[in-house]
Amino acid sequence: MSELNELAATVGAMLKQREETIAVSESSSGGLVSAALLSVPGASAYFMGGAVTYTGTARDAYLEIDLDAHPGMRSASEPYALLCAKSSRERLGTTWGLSETGAAGPTGNRYGDESGHTCVAVSGPVELTETLETGLTDRAENMDLFAKKALELLDKALRQAGH
C-alpha cells in the first residue's frame, strides 16, 4: 500500500467512525487526493464528491466562487485554498472541505510561484492552511507530494477536532 493510500485509510477510518463527510477541491494534484480517499473500502460513507478545479472556468462551475467579492485574492495562496475548501464543504453540505491549489511544474505559475509550490486547506470544525515548497520541477512527483500534504493536513485537523 502506498503512503498516500495509508494516509487515506487513516483519515477515512476517522471520518467513518465519527460519521463525518468530506468534499474535495483540488487543482495541481489532479484528482490524486480524491482517488486516494476513494481507494478506501467503504469510502461512500464519508466521500461526498470532489472536483479538479484546474481552471477558472472549472472553479466558477463547481465552486461558484466570485473572485470579485474577494479583491486581491489569487490562486495558489492560503486564503484562496481556504475559500475553495469552504466552498466545497458548503456546496456539498459536508462536515469537512479539503482543497489544494498550486504549481506542479515543470515551471512556475503566472503569479510568480515556483514549481513545487502548493497551498492546502481544511475547512470544518477546525480550519487549517499550510504552504508546501518542494523545490522540485518533476510534475508527477510534485502532484504526489501535494496530495500527501493535503491528506496530512486533513489528518491534523481531524485529530485537533477530536471526539
Image (spheres, rainbow, N blue to C red):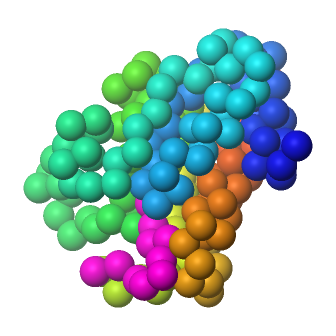
Quadrant location of the N terminus in the rendered image = top right
Instruction: Looking at the picture, tell me which residue is in the foreground, 63 or 57.
Output: 57
- Residue 12 lies left or right of residue 123; in this view the side is right
Let me know if residue 102 is in the magenta part: yes
- Residue 27 lies left or right of residue 15; in this view the side is left
Quadrant location of the C terminus in the rendered image = top right
Instruction: Looking at the picture, tell me which residue is in the foreground, 55 or 98.
Output: 55
Q: Is residue 110 visible?
A: yes
Residue 40 % position (x, y): 75, 27
Residue 120 % position (x, y): 54, 57
Q: Is residue 153 visible?
A: no
Q: Does residue 157 lie above or below 21 as drawn?
A: below
- Residue 45 lies left or right of residue 14; in this view the side is left
Q: Does residue 108 lie above or below 152 as drawn?
A: below
Q: Residue at x 54, y 72 (%)?
A: 139
| Majority secondary structure of magenta residues | loop
Quadrant of res 102? bottom left
Residue 51 % position (x, y): 41, 38
- Residue 130 lies left or right of residue 108; in this view the side is right
Residue 94 % position (x, y): 50, 22
Q: Residue at x 59, y 78 (%)?
A: 138
Q: Residue at x 48, y 81 (%)?
A: 106
Q: How many marks?
A: 0
Q: Does residue 109 lie above or below 41 as drawn?
A: below
Residue furthest out toward the left: 68
The stretch of residues the image draws in magenta is 100-110
Let me know if residue 96 is in the magenta part: no
Q: Residue at x 30, y 80 (%)?
A: 111
